[in-house]
């Protein structure tokens, strides 16, 4: 059974860096063709794709937060990490990690439960 679990701080101060870890069990992040994404959803708004990584380490990011976004893989621990720098209150959202299996853009096989992140003083 595949499970994804987000972990990290629930509260981050403006200008700081948000770091979230997605730990994967029951599957390998090194699996070919699988994608590992971060998606967020501000309250009252739709889902926003942040970026993704592949087993090869190749990454892709949403244009808007790209300059502030970094996603890395730690295959030894079967997890991948989101770093979002210079956060503002606009970054407040529920953050999800998700696994895709090449079924199409925006189609994910598994999701984490999501974790609320609030950017505030």
Image (cartoon, rainbow, N blue to C red):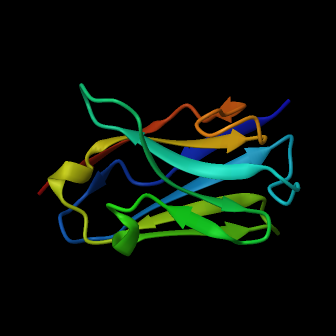
- Left-right relation of 116 to 111: left
Q: Which residue lies furthest to the left in this view?
A: 121
Q: Can residue 119 be seen in this view?
A: no
Q: Where is residue 95 in the image (x, y as percent from the top left)?
A: 43, 43
- Left-right relation of 62 to 98: left
Between residue 72 and residue 8, name the one nearer to us: 72
Q: Is residue 91 visible?
A: yes
Q: Where is residue 12 in the image (x, y as percent from the top left)?
A: 27, 58
Measured along the vertical axis of the image, is residue 100 above or below residue 78?
Answer: above
> Residue, x 72% and y 31% (percent of image)?
109
> Residue, x 28% and y 51% (percent of image)?
11
| Residue 46, picture quadrant | top left
Measured along the vertical axis of the image, is residue 33 above or below residue 46?
Answer: below
Measured along the vertical axis of the image, is residue 114 above or below residue 90?
Answer: above
- Left-right relation of 22 to 3: left
> Residue, x 25% and y 30% (percent of image)?
43
- Left-right relation of 3 to 72: right
Between residue 91 and residue 18, name the one nearer to us: 91
Which quadrant is home to the C terminus?
Answer: bottom left
Measured along the vertical axis of the image, is residue 48 above or below residue 75?
Answer: above
């Amino acid at each position: 059974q595949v499970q994804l679990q987000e972990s990290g701080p629930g509260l981050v101060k403006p200008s700081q860096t948000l770091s979230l870890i997605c730990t994967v069990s029951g599957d390998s992040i090194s699996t070919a063709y699988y994608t590992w994404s971060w998606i967020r959803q501000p309250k009252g708004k739709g889902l926003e794709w942040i970026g993704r990584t592949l087993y090869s380490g190749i990454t892709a990011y949403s244009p808007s937060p790209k300059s502030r976004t970094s996603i890395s893989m730690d295959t030894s621990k079967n997890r991948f990490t989101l770093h979002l720098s210079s956060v503002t209150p606009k970054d407040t959202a529920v953050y999800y990690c998700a696994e895709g299996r090449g079924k199409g853009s925006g189609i994910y096989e598994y999701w984490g439960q999501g974790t609320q992140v609030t950017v505030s003083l």
